[in-house]
Amino acid sequence: MAAKKAGAKSRNPELIRGIGKYSRSKMYHKRGIWAIKAKHGGSLPRHEPKAAPPKPAAKPPKFYPADDVKTPIPNHRKPKPTKLRPSITPGTVLILLAGRFMGKRVVFLKQLPSGLLLVTGPFKINGVPLRRVNQAYVIGTSTKIDISGVDVEKFDDKYFTKEKKKKTKKSENEFFDARIEETKALPQEKKDDQKAVDTQLIKAIELVPDLKAYLGARFSLRAGMKPHELVF
Amino acid sequence: MVKGRQGERVRLYVRGTILGYKRSKSNQYENTSLIQIEGVNTKEEVAWYCGKRMAYIYKAKIKSDGTRYRCIWGKVTRSHGNSGVVRAKFKSNLPPKSMV
């Protein structure tokens, strides 16, 4: 059958699923097939089939596997980054709940393509560097900072991957020396990136009274605090 | 736990008391424990805690994985009764010595 144009509606309204209002002969009349036939001298116009491009001659394969080889089903799924909670927007102060910096209040910068959140202390205020954090281990507070002055475009997941260690042949003496060298100092460019992001942030933070001290302090539950009643 | 930095004690967990196992008068079901969470006194308040994870932490004489502390993980499953007690299921059942 010829392809339908997009938006072409059926002229046969459905009475019930599968049953149309008009019979075949009525539909023939409605669609105007009689008029098309009359215009073209008694039969519907036919088009010559498009010449198919000549297929290259396939050579018979040299090798047939003994058992049937199963072809894997192609997977076209592209994973999206995890959905951000509506309370977490760029510039929100977050409370970290686990890990080395648990309890620290930290500024959220952006969500990376892997779904992790990019976060910074700022380092001068509470010692938390540019870091990735999982959304599940975070409480979003209602405190927001204006981070429009900060350029976070250059940070992505590759920035945070560990350097691959080169395999060196170990002899008895070299083994101990190599271990001491393992602890690398942070490369200067990462320190500069940290400074560049933080100077902008600290300017915005100092505008708000007490915010600097707030970010420097850690969150902790104390006697009488009930988490189900706390409003963050 | 000892860490190599100045220990600023941050408590991000809520304490609880283990009351016993789910039970009727003369039968008990050890796969579910009853926990009293501090500060929770009605069954409406329990809704916030449903699904949250719990850990029963205890000490042992022998060091395993570098520490003498051991842990059984679990979750809050549902409320129990009207007064904020909670039912919880742990990875392995809680030992009877955990109930005071």
Image (spheres, coloured by chain):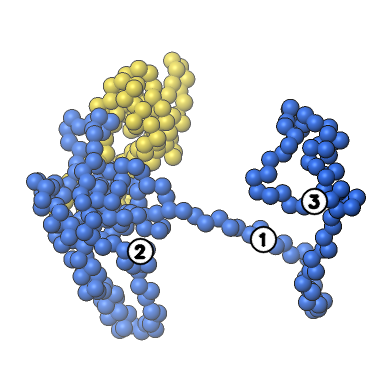
Chain colours: A blue, B yellow
Q: Residues under labels 2 and 3: Cα distance?
A: 51 Å
- Mark nearest the camera among 2 and 3 is 3
Q: Residues within 10 Å of mark 3 (few under 14, many from 20)?
A: few
Q: Are marks 2 and 3 on the same chain?
A: yes
Task: Give me the disc on residue A1.
Answer: 3
The part of the image, by quadrant, that contains residue A183 is: bottom left
**Upstream in sequence: badge 2 or badge 3:** 3
Kind of residue at badge 3: Met
**Residue found at the far left of this picture:** A209
Q: Position of residue A228 (x, y in %)?
A: 28, 31
Q: Secondary structure at mark 1?
A: loop
Q: Depth-wise, is mark 2 or mark 1 nearer the camera? A: 2
For marks 1 and 3, give the CA distance.
Answer: 34 Å
Give the percent coordinates (x, y) of residue A192.
20, 70
> Does B32 sit left or right of A5 as displayed?
left
Front-lying residue, A6 or A143: A6
**Residue A161: % across, % down:** 36, 67
Query: Mark 1 sits on what residue?
Result: A72
Where residue B10 appears, as percent x and y from the top left, is: 20, 45
Whether residue B69 sits left or right of residue A202 in the image: it is right
| Mark 1 on the same chain as mark 3 | yes
Chain at tag 1:
A
Secondary structure under tag 3 reads loop
Give the mark nearest the N terminus, 2 or 1: 1
Q: Amino acid at mark 1?
A: Pro
Q: Which residue is mark 2?
A: A156
Front position in the image: B14 or A126: A126
- Looking at the rendered structure, the secondary structure element under dot 2 is loop
